[in-house]
Image: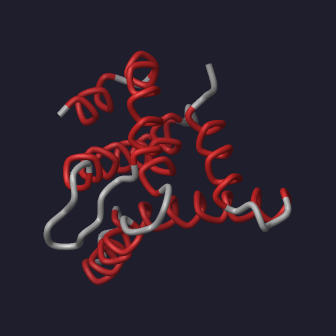
Amino acid sequence: MESCFELWKRLTTNHHRSKSVVETDMAQQQAIDYLLATLQQTLQPDANVRVAAERQLKELSKQPNHPLICLHLVSQRNTPQDAPIRQAAAVLFKNLVKNHWDEDHDTGVKIPENERHMIKAHLVDLMCTVPSAIQMQCSE
């Protein structure tokens, strides 16, 4: 079975057919890095930084494959220092699914069927491999 990241990579590679593999890999990594940096900003003590990051997360939720990028960050097994970011990604992922599984009446955003299928296919595996705090977030 493919990992969440492998599936996301395959999907985004197909989404960007006109780009070279190198450009696609770079774009995927940039999307991951950007979300990671934005999540880090949501944990900052400065309220202005947090509010700006939260606004940016709202805008990102309209982008293709955004729930899959979140799922990728949730599934990462990094150092203990990364735990707060992983937890923030889990909260974001849960909220995206809750708010956008069906069409959001405020924004008109709905998670596309292919992304929903991928989420369903990998959620059980994810739940078996993440710490209990993240399991609790994803199970709501």
- The way the protein has been coloured in the rendering is secondary structure
Q: Residue 110 appears at what percent x and percent y?
A: 30, 58
Image: 3 above or below 39: above
Is 47 or 108 nearer to us in this picture? 108
Q: How many marks?
A: 0
From the top left corner, tell me how far across and down residue 46 is, in percent.
30, 77
To which quarter of the image does residue 33 belong?
bottom right
- Picture quadrant where residue 38 is located: bottom left
Q: Which residue lies most toward the left here?
A: 105
| Location of residue 135 with respect to 18 vertically, above or below | above
As drawn, is 112 to the left or to the right of 132?
A: right
Image quadrant containing the N terminus: top right
Compared with residue 50, is residue 94 higher up or lower down, i.e. above or below?
A: above
Which residue: 64% across, 58% down? 15
Front residue of 31 and 114: 114
Viewer-side residue, 138 vs 123: 123
Position of residue 113 relative to residue 59, above or below, is above
Q: Quadrant of the C terminus?
A: top left
Outermost residue to the top: 128
Identify the residue at image location x=43%, y=43%: 86
Q: Is residue 117 left or right of residue 72?
A: left
Residue 48 appears in which quarter of the rendering?
bottom left
Q: Residue at x 34, y 47 (%)?
A: 93
Q: Position of residue 135 (x, y in %)?
A: 30, 26
x and y percent of residue 122 in the render?
46, 27
